[in-house]
Every structure is written in structure tokens, then in C-alpha cells.
Amino acid sequence: MAKPYIAIVGAGALGCLFGAGFCEAGYEVTLVTRTPESSVLLRQNGIRIDTYADTRIVTGFAATAEYASVRNASVVIILVKSSATADVAKALAPHLTPNTLVLTLQNGLGNVEALTAHIPASRVAAGITGNGAALLGNGHIRFGGITETVLGEQAGGPSIRLEAVRDIFVKAGFPTRVSETLTSVVWTKLMVNVGLNPVSALTGLRNGDIVKEKEAFVLAEAAVREAATVAAALGIRLDVDDPVAHMYRAASLTAANETSMLQDLRAGRLTEIEAMNGQIEQYARTLGVPVPVNTTLASLIRLLQKKR
């Protein structure tokens, strides 16, 4: 993949984090925003990244609300909320070339299916990322810690094109590998999400505090164990031996991060609860597997969404 042009659809916390990293690594980058006003502010102000050590501002990327900007992209990375995936896929489809790879790094389940309803499955890949960032304002993020990003093809097996994408991430400072088992990768990330996201959203705790507070961690652990039981009942083999330890490690590596669900509730936005604990709830109902913790967490988040 020579001189890749990278388009990122979604200029939230992770969209800005990756966009800034790719730009600093020397790649041509375009952020596709939800509104023209957001793209104007990004072009004017750049991306501001706050860490506990310093603050830096990254410029040199393009920003637009026009989906036609992805036409010549080598890879289009999808980082919108799960509830918007279908609409984004429909808007993107007319502008994609046969050589463009569409890569979803979104949270939860169902995003690949929403994309392939409008985009040929051969052009769609998926992955997970545990990198932490909180959106403080338009183009302004607080860095919360780096963890591994994992990419995979729907058909499984080795992938030359994803290895090229992996190299882009690595050059930009994001540890990344390619997995041969996409379903395992997506469900393994779900183990982190179903534990940390709703507990964080309900308590206001950051990732690192959840593993320190006994009551919070017990609740997150129970949600993860239920989700792992559902995965086993579906015949899905996770990418890790101990999903609870995996969730603990992810929280520790991004200790300062606030989950996207907590950020969404604070901002009055729709959360991704249906793509996380809501999916576990649905699968469990079909399988006849009890998941009382996931059901309760999902119900509480839904109530808060209605209230806010």
C-alpha cells in the first residue's frame, strides 16, 4: 500500500486520536465529521491532545463533512456510534472504489453487518481497539492510554492488505496485530465493553477506579462472566483464556480514561448499550441463558438515556 491516504469517518475521541497519530506519522489524513461546522473548527484549530505530561496540537490533516472525500482513500476507518453505522454505510457506498478497504473499529456487535448491507463484504474488515481518549470539545481530547489494536478479515486467515494497514498503525505509534479469527477478536473486545462501559456510566468512575473499587469491579466481573457464558453457548472461542483478567488489564492500561458510554450520558447522547450489554441480553434470551447482571445494567442505562 504505497503512500496510503487514510479517511476516518467520525471525529470523536478515537477518531481524533488516530487521525492525529497518522498525520504525525506522515500520512495523508481526512477526518469526515458529522457537520460542516465541526470540520471548519477542526481545520482552524487542529486537534488538541492533553496528557498528564503536556499538551500538543496537531495540524496538517483535512476535515470535511462530505463523504465524497473518501473516494481515493486506501482505507476508510469507521469510528461513529453503532446506531449511526447503517446510515454512514449507505452514504459511503457510492464513493468507494474497488480498492478501498473499509475498516470498522467500533464498539459492540452488529457493525460489520450494518456495513455489509450497503458495501460489498469483500471490502469490509473489522478490528478492536482499547486505546483510551475522552472528548473534551470539538477536536480536543484527553489521552487515556494506549493498548493493543487487533485487525481481522471476515473470512479469517492471513491477510496481506491488513498487514499493510497494521504497519500504518504501528508506524503511528499504535501497537497492532492481525488476527486470523475476526469473530473471536470482536467478542473479546465485547468482554471489556460489557464490564467497563455500563459500570463507568452508572458510577462516574474512570477505568482504573473500577478495578480498584471492590463493588464496582465485582459488578463488572459478573457482567463479563455472563457474556463469556453466552459466547461459549454460541460456540465462539475468545481470543483470551481469561476474559475477566483481560478486562482488568485493559482497564489498568487505560486507567485515566472515561468510557465512551460515560461520555455519551454526560453529553446527553445516545449510548451504545444496545450493541454491548443489549446484544448479550438478546442472545441470552434466544439461548435460554440467564444474564441478570447484563439485563439490569442495560435497563439502567436505557432509563438514564430517557431521562437525559
Image (spheres, rainbow, N blue to C red):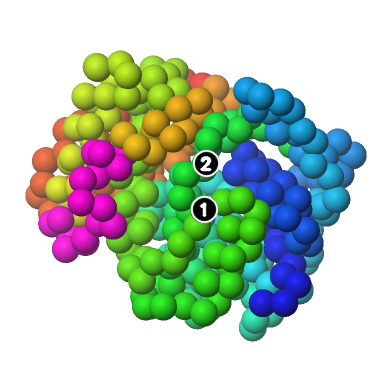
In the rendered image, residue 236 lying in the magenta stretch gets the answer yes
Identify the residue at horizontal 67%, vertical 77% (top origin).
1
CB-based contact (under 8 Å), mark 2 and mark 1: yes
Q: Which residue is disc 1 drawn over?
A: 175
Identify the residue at horizontal 55%, vertical 65% (top origin).
166
Q: Amino acid at mark 1?
A: Pro
Picture quadrant where residue 37 is located = top right
The stretch in magenta equals 232-247
On screen, 185 above or below 117?
above
On screen, 290 above or below 116?
above
Q: Which residue is disc 2 drawn over?
A: 146
Identify the residue at horizontal 19%, vertical 32% (top origin).
222
Query: Residue 249 appears at what percent x and percent y?
Result: 34, 37
In the rendered image, residue 298 lying in the magenta stretch gets the answer no
* Position of residue 97 in the picture relative to residue 260 (left or right): right
| Spatial CA span between label 2 and label 1 | 8 Å
Q: How many marks?
A: 2
Give 188 or 176, whichever is nearer the viewer. Answer: 176
